[in-house]
Amino acid sequence: MSSVKRSRSPLETPVQYVKGVGPRRAAILARLGIENVEDLLYHVPRRYVDRSTVRKIRDLRMGEHETFLGKVVTKGLRRTKSGESVFSLALTDGTEIITCKWFNQPYLTNTFKVGDEFIVSGDINYYRGLQTIHPEYERASDAEQLLHTGRVVPIYPLSEGIGQKQMRKIVRNALDLGLPCVEETLPEDMVKRKGLLARKEAVSQVHFPEIPKQGEEARRRMAFDELFYLQLLLAIRKKRMLTPRAGIRFDKGERFCRMLLEGLKFELTKAQKKVLSEIKEDMRGGRVMNRLLQGDVGSGKTIVAVMALLIAVESGYQSAIMAPTEILAEQHYLVMKELLHGMDLEVILLLGKMSKKEKEEAYCLMESGEASIVIGTHALIEEGVHFKSLGLVVVDEQHRFGVVQRAKFRRKGFCPDFLVMTATPIPRTLSLTLYGDLDISIIDELPPGRKKVTTRVVGENKREKVHGFVRDEMAKGRQCYVVCPLIEESEKLDLKAAQEVHKRLKNEIFQDLNVGLLHGRMKPDEKEKTMREFRAGKTHILVSTTVIEVGVDVPNATVMIVEHAERFGLAQLHQLRGRIGRGAERSVCVLMCGKQLSREARERLNAMAKTTDGFEIAEMDLRLRGPGEFFGTRQHGLPEMKVADLVVDSKLLVGARDEAFRIVNEDTDLLMEKNRVIRKVFMSKYKESLELARVG
Ligand code: ADP
Ligand code: MG
C-alpha cells in the first residue's frame, strides 16, 4: 500500500490532499468531475477579468469594474432595521476615500485592521461618496502571490459550496504541487509548426495569464492536445478498418436490386442514386465499408439501406439491420416484408421483449444461416447471438448508438461492412469528432412532390381553434399525431401525461373519432397492433410519447400537435416534425407551449417555425445546448473533452485532424522513434478506447 502511494505522481494525488481542500470540498469538486491534481490543472477558467490596472481612487470610473490600492481608515459593523448586518470599510490611498460594503458577512470585521493595506477589485458606484459592494480583496503584502486582484483573474466554473476565491487558491496550490511534473505531450516540431505554447507553460498560463490573450493562447494549446489525441484514435481506427485483408467483396446483387426497383411506385432521386453508387463501390471493393449515411427525415434512407442488404444477401451473406427502438424495428420489419415480397428471403425479427422460445427460434435461424435478413434492436448484440455469415450491418438512427455498440457488433461477424444511418444532421465539427473514422454519404434532396410542413407556435388560449382545425383535417380523411410532453426523462411520467391527454381527447373532445395511444411501456404486439391500425387509417388520431420520434412512416398523417413543445430540444422537434409532410398533402405542425416561456425557449420555437432545414436547426441546437447535450458524448464511448469546445474550436479541430491523420498514414502503430512521445501519451490516455479500435 505504502509503496503504491510513494510511486504515485503528484498529478494523480487525490484533490482531498491538496492544500485548502479536505474531504468536504473534495466531494464538491467531485461534482465538477475533479478528482485529482491533474483534473484541477485541467479545470480551465470560463473567462478572465482584467484587474491588472491599479488606479488611484480619485481616478476610479463610475459603473466600471476597477482595481485600486488603499489603507483601512475606519471600519464599522451595524444592523439594518430588517436585521441584516452591514460591514463597511473606508479605504484611502491619499487621493480620495472609498467605502466598501459587505452584507451579512459580519466575520469580515476580523479580517481588516485599521492601517492595513489592501488591493481591492469591484464595481464602482456612488452613494454619499465613492462606494463598492462586495468587492474582492487581497492584503497588499501578499502582492508577490496576488490571486484575486491586481492582475488578470480567472473566473472558474463552480459548484454549489465553493466560491471563486477558494477555487483560485485551490488551483494555485495544485499548480505548485503538480506543475513541475507536467510533461510535454506533443513532438517539438509539431508544437513549433502549429505555433503552440509548450504544455507546461500552457497549463500554468491558462489559470494565471498576464494578459487575457495569453490565457486564450494557453487554452488553445490544451484544446489542441485533446483534439489531436482524439483524432489520432479515430485515424488509427479508420486505418485498421481499411486494411484490405479484412473486407468482403460483395460481387452480386444486381438481380435482387432490379426486382426491388421494379416493384417500387417511384423513381429513386438523384441523391439516392448517388449514395447508392458510393455504397456499392465500398461493398464491391476489398476494404471494409464503414459509412455514415446522412439524410434529413423523409429523404428515403430506408430504400437505400434495403438495396445494400440485398447486395449482401445475393452475394451469399447474411445481413442485419439494427434500430434504436422496438417500434422502429417492427416498422422496418413490416416495410421489409412488403418490399421483399416475392423474393423468397427469410426475414426475421429479434427483439429484447420476445419470449425465450421465440428468441431461441430466431437464434437458430441466424446460426444456421437460414435467416437472410435479421431486423432487431439491441437484442442483436446480446451474448449468445451468433450469425453464420454476417456480411453487412445497417444501423438506423446512429446517434442513439455508440462506438461501444458498434465494436460489439463487429465481434458478431467475421468482418461485416457497416452502414450507419442518421436523420439528425450533424454539424461538420461534430461529425469529424464523433464519426471521424467513417466515410460520409449525404442524401441532400427530398423525393419530389413533398410539401413543406407549416409550423405554428401556439399558446394555450388557441387550443379550441387547434381542435377545430384537427376536426377539419380529419373530415378530409387525414390523420393526426399528438405528441405528449417530455417529462424529465422519466418514462413513467411521460406515460402518465400521454394517458391523460389520450383520455381527454377520446372521451371529451373527439368522441366521434378513433383515438389511439402509443407508448414505450406497451407490449411489442400491442404496439404493432396500434401502429398497424394507424397505418391502415382505422385510427384517426394517435396520441403518443416520443416513441414515434424516429422512423415511423404514415404518409396520410398531415397534422402533428406537440404538447409543451418548449420541453423538447430542437433536433428532437425536427425529428418529430419529420413524421408528417410525407405525402402529397399540405401538413401542419402545431407547437403548443406553456404560458411562461423563457426567452431562449421562445427563440428556439420560433426558429422551428421559420426553417425546415435540418442542418440549420442542428447548428442552432448545437450552439444553444452545447455538444454534450446535443449528442451525449459520453454514450459514444469517446473520451470526454475537458477543454476543447467543438463549436468554438472547429478550426483547431481540423488542424489537429490533419496532423493526426498524417502521422497515422505514415506510421499506423506509432512505432517510429519520432512518434515515441505520441505513442506513450496515447497509450496512457486511450488504452481503453484503443481496445475498441482493435475490435474493428
Ligand atoms: P427516412 O430517410 O426518414 O428514413 P424513409 O426511408 O422512411 O425516410 O422514406 C420516407 C418515405 O418516402 C417512404 O414512404 C418512402 O417509401 C418514400 N420514398 C423514398 N424514396 C422515394 C422516392 N425516390 N420517391 C418518392 N418517395 C420515396
Ligand atoms: Mg428512417
Image: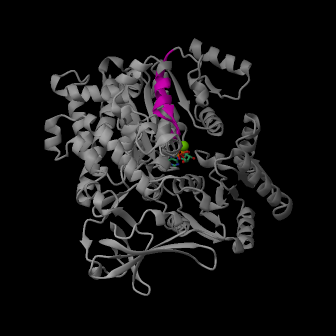
Task: Tell me what residue is drawn at x 56 percent, y 24 percent.
Answer: 381
Residue 168 is one of the magenta-drawn residues? no
Residue 123 spot, x, y in % from top left:
39, 74
Please determine whether, in this image, residue 84 is positioned above or below residue 392.
Answer: below
Please determine whether, in this image, residue 36 is positioned above or below residue 625.
Answer: above
Q: Quadrant of the N terminus?
A: top left
Q: Which residues are magenta?
A: 389-410
Q: Is residue 487 left or right of residue 107?
A: right
Q: Is residue 121 left or right of residue 669?
A: right
Viewer-side residue, 352 vs 82: 82
Viewer-side residue, 651 vs 548: 651
Residue 415 spot, x, y in % from top left:
42, 20
Viewer-side residue, 347 vs 575: 575
Q: Is residue 549 left or right of residue 215?
A: right
Q: Is residue 569 in view?
A: yes
Residue 404 is one of the magenta-drawn residues? yes
Task: Tell me what residue is drawn at x 27 percent, y 36 percent.
Answer: 182
Please determine whether, in this image, residue 692 is positioned above or below residue 21.
Answer: above
- Displayed quadrant of residue 330: top right
- Displayed quadrant of residue 212: bottom left
Q: Quadrant of the C terminus?
A: top left
Q: Residue furthest front?
A: 114
